[in-house]
Image: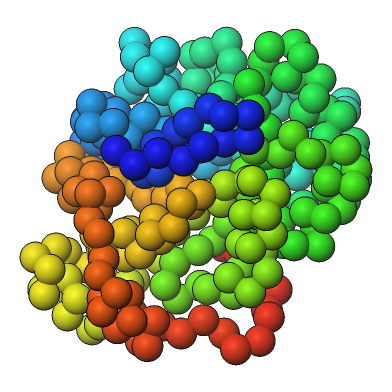
Amino acid sequence: MKIVTLPGGETVPALGQGTWMMGERHDRRGDEIAALRTGVKLGMTLIDTADMYGDGAAETLIGEALGDVRDRLFLVSKAYPHNASRKRLGRACEASLKRLGTDRLDLYLLHWRESVPLGETVEAMDALKSAGKIRHWGVSNLDTDDMDELVAAGGGACATDQILYNVTRRGSEHDLLPWLVEHGIPAMAYSPVEQGRLLAARTLAEVAKTIGATPAQVALAWVMRHDGVIAIPKAGSVDHVRENRAAADLVLSDADLAALDAAFPRPRDRRPLEML
């Protein structure tokens, strides 16, 4: 498994498992649990979730599915922005820990930015780290100017910025991704297959056919083509997990990348960071 290095030197797999919309349907629960467990066996030990996902249902599912292999995992969860204050972040973290059935998070993220000053969120995150409730902290959906402000507010320990990034969402390539590289902060790409909508793209299908892969695998390999980018696709079945895992071993040629670049060019001008 390709790895990505966090600030400070710890490594995580470049391909993890997302859990958005998991744990919300009883008829899918068995398949989702099997998918998560299979992914861990295949090396996809970074598990991403959030208190927002099903109002905690995804966190509860993870605790049920993976509680007995907790020490093999790199658990990531995210806090609502209205809970990102000194007063509320600790309670939000404790609630996530309880649902996950663990005593610590490996990475805790601010889900997006609202009215709480970033400096206050940094202080609250540092307090949780000092208390042993989290090992690292980071952010999600923050653009370049937000990241500048975060660092200026004492947030130099930020471990990642989780962003919407795939072949059709390339605006971050103008300045945010270069900024993250310069500061040694990995990007974590959510919706790397655009929630499945990319699977019908003709060029992805053509490249996939040429190299004996699937369109989803090509899309994932494209996201992971550079060091410092972690992809977190969701998979609700064992077969889907196995398909995703194979993408981590896929190397796109210069010709493949040129074809994808021509079909999905990045915007000519800088645009605000997109988010779902």
Which quadrant of the view contains residue 143?
bottom right
Q: Is residue 125 left or right of residue 67?
A: right
Residue 185 vertical placement versus 199 (above, below):
above
Instruction: Determine which quarter of the picture holds residue 118.
Output: top right
| Number of dots carrying numbers | 0
Q: Is residue 126 above or below residue 243?
A: above
225 over 87 or under it: above or below:
below
Q: Residue at x 81, y 39 (%)?
A: 155
50 to the left or right of 273: left
Q: State left or right for residue 246 relative to residue 64.
A: left
Could you tell me if residue 18 is visible in this image?
Answer: no
Which quadrant of the figure contains the N terminus? top left
Residue 44, given in percent of the width and then of the height, sits at: 32, 35
Instruction: Using the image as rendered, state which of residue 206 and residue 198 is in the foreground.
Output: 206
In the image, residue 206 lies at what x, y percent?
Answer: 17, 80
Residue 188 locus on image (x, y percent): 52, 49
Position of 146 compared to 47: left or right? right
What residue sits 83% from the left and 35% below the top? 122
Does residue 173 show up? Answer: yes
Rendering colour mode: rainbow
**Residue for point 73% across, 19% down:** 129
Which image quarter holds the C terminus?
bottom right
Depth check, front residue: 246 or 82? 246
Residue 245 screen position, x and y as percent: 24, 44
Residue 41 position by quadrant = top left
Q: Residue at x 17, y 71 (%)?
A: 208
